[in-house]
Image (tube, rainbow, N blue to C red):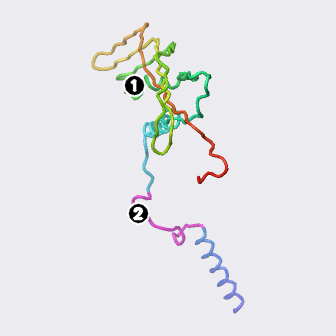
């Protein structure tokens, strides 16, 4: 009798420990968030928008700080805008995403981009806060985008508009800083 009672008591304790460790009874699940604990569906549009904002901020919205210009060396900008940067600037001006399916859709095909440097100059040295003495290097580009555009409108009167010879011009500025003076202070500097 005592042996049956002890084994059933041990079985009961082990069963309670097993239930409490799985979280089935809510004994160890942590803080109760109430109605906020229910997942809320989020549209992929907002996720895509945040990812695009991060991509643009990381790749194109920062001004790099380069080493000093050497005397006698070329003071020309070496990198022209990438096709991705040109198309993102174009999409900000004339968005094609976010159309309403079967009501208004825009497609751009056969895209060709021509990039022309229209200005490349360096400002005289000045002191920038948090950077120190530097020169601002400007590079301005004119990007001509040739494409064919198809617009499908589904309401009130369904029709399709085709522009086979569409042309748009986007101006992009590539600015960066060049340090001036002794960039590496070396030994004995208080910094």
Residue drawn at 67 percent across, 82 percent down:
10
Residue lying furthest bottom: 2
Q: Nearer the viewer, residue 39 or 4?
A: 39
Q: CA distance from mark 1 to mark 2?
A: 40 Å
Q: Which residue is mark 2?
A: 34
Quarter residue 72 falls in: top right
Q: Is residue 8 above or below residue 88?
A: below
Closer to the chain start, of discs 1 and 2, is 2
- Quadrant holding the N terminus: bottom right
Residue 118 vs 29, above or below: the answer is above
Label 1 belongs to which residue? 95
The residue positioned 42% from the left and 14% from the top of the image is 149
Seen from the viewer's position, the closer of residues 91 and 22 is: 91
In the image, which residues are magenta? 22-37
Query: Where in the figure is residue 112, as x and y percent of width and height?
Result: 51, 13
Residue 132, image x, y percentages: 50, 42
**Residue 168 point in image, percent of width and height:** 41, 14
């Amino acid at each position: 009798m005592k042996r049956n009672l002890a084994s059933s008591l041990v079985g009961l304790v082990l069963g309670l420990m097993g239930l409490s460790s799985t979280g089935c009874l809510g004994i160890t699940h942590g803080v109760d968030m109430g109605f906020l604990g229910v997942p809320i569906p989020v549209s992929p549009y907002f996720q895509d928008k945040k990812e695009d904002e991060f991509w643009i901020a990381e790749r194109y919205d920062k001004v790099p700080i380069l080493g000093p210009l050497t005397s006698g060396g070329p003071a020309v900008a070496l990198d022209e805008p990438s096709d991705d940067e040109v198309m993102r600037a174009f999409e900000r001006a004339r968005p094609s995403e976010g159309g309403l399916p079967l009501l208004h859709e825009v497609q751009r095909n056969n895209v060709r981009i021509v990039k022309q440097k229209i200005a490349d100059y360096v400002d005289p040295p000045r002191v920038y806060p948090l950077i120190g003495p530097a020169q601002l290097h400007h590079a301005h580009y004119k990007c001509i985008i040739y494409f064919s555009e198809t617009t499908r409108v589904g309401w009130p009167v369904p029709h399709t508009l085709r522009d086979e010879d569409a042309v748009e011009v986007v101006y992009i500025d590539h600015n960066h800083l060049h340090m001036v003076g002794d960039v590496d202070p070396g030994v004995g500097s208080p910094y």
